[in-house]
Image (cartoon, rainbow, N blue to C red):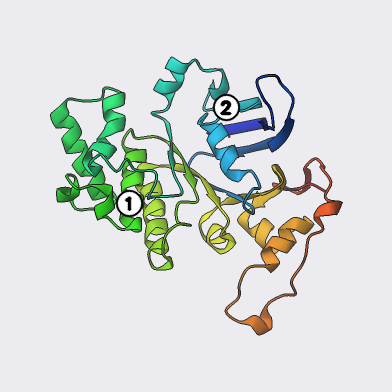
């Protein structure tokens, strides 16, 4: 079966301390990352802050230009597209940002924010677009009469629904969900996650779900890749990764998950960062890989 998204040997370097005269040093934020996402899948990308997961997601969409590698979406290598072709291709893949407070333009009404992708891609008449915006508000559980209000008039959970409405406005098949609930109160996180799952079923969406909440990833993702220092150190089904972790870093992450029953919590595992080695992924069992 051909994957919807196929990422091969993705690399992203940043240069620090450089000037117009040159010099400085390179920091490798994404280091030879390879994975694929199947149609209709919720693929989880997890790791600590600074592990490279958000940079990976943005490189996939070319919001950040990768240093090297290939990103094939359906039959198209996204990294070879001209600016004009990339703009047209963005109808098919979108992003939901982590922070619902900074990702919405405070000077625009939320109706205009959701309508903006339709305007950019010249889809429909003005009347058609207004009807579509109301349909999108209904899809994400917001009242249609809210379209004339501004972002500051909404709660964090409502703002994330607005961001999601904007992301699905062009009827994409693939969405990068970049820690979509980490900035929200715990009381509304479940509502937004349930909305993501509902839209996946109703619209046939495929997600790259970036998160550091391992319990949430275990609940919603089909497969999971664990990142450390820009590399994928383990990848497999959620059951394999969470029930049979093979890489020491994965075991350390899982041992840090808070438990409601501390007495039954497994012993905390620490990972020796100094002993970390860059190793290729090895298939341990069918579909379960680890850098060992």
Secondary structure state at the residue bearing disc 1:
helix
Secondary structure state at the residue bearing disc 2:
loop
Locate residue 204 relative to residue 154 in the image: left or right. Answer: right
Q: Position of residue 178 (x, y in %)?
A: 50, 46
Relative to 86, is 201 above or below? below
Q: Position of residue 151 (x, y in %)?
A: 28, 48
Whether residue 33 is visible to the viewer of this picture, yes or no, is yes
Locate residue 37 relative to residue 141 in the image: left or right. Answer: right
The one of 139 and 54 positioned closer to us in this rendering:
54
Relative to 44, is 168 above or below? above
Picture quadrant where residue 259 is located: bottom right
- The residue to which callout 2 is attached is 65
- Toward the right, the furthest residue is 275
| Residue 247 marker | none
Q: Position of residue 53 (x, y in %)?
A: 60, 44
| Residue 159 marker | 1
């Amino acid at each position: 079966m051909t994957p919807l998204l196929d990422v091969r040997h993705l690399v992203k370097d940043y240069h620090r301390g450089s000037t117009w005269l040159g010099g400085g040093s390179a920091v490798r934020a994404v280091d030879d990352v390879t994975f694929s996402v199947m149609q209709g899948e919720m693929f989880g990308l997890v790791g600590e802050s600074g592990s490279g997961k958000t940079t990976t997601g943005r490189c996939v969409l070319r919001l950040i230009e990768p240093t090297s590698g290939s990103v094939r979406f359906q039959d198209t290598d996204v990294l070879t597209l001209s600016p004009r072709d990339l703009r047209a291709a963005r109808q098919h893949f979108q992003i939901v940002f982590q922070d619902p407070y900074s990702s919405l333009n405070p000077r625009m009404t939320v109706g205009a924010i959701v309508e903006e992708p339709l305007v950019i891609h010249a889809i429909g008449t003005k009347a058609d677009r207004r009807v579509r915006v109301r349909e999108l508000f209904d899809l994400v559980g917001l009242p249609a009469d809210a379209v004339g209000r501004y972002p500051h008039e909404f709660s964090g959970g409502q703002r994330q629904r607005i961001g999601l409405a904007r992301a699905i406005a062009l009827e994409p098949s693939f969405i990068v969900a970049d820690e979509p609930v980490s900035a929200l109160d715990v009381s509304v996180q479940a509502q937004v996650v349930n909305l993501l799952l509902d839209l996946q079923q109703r619209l046939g969406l495929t997600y790259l779900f970036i998160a550091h909440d391992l319990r949430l990833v275990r609940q919603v993702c089909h497969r999971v890749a664990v990142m450390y220092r820009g590399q994928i150190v383990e990848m497999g089904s959620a059951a394999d990764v969470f029930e049979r972790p093979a890489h020491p870093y994965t075991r350390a992450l899982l041992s840090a998950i808070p438990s409601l029953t501390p007495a039954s919590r497994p012993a905390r595992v620490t990972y020796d960062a100094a002993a970390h080695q860059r190793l290729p992924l090895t298939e341990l069992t069918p579909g379960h890989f680890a850098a060992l």
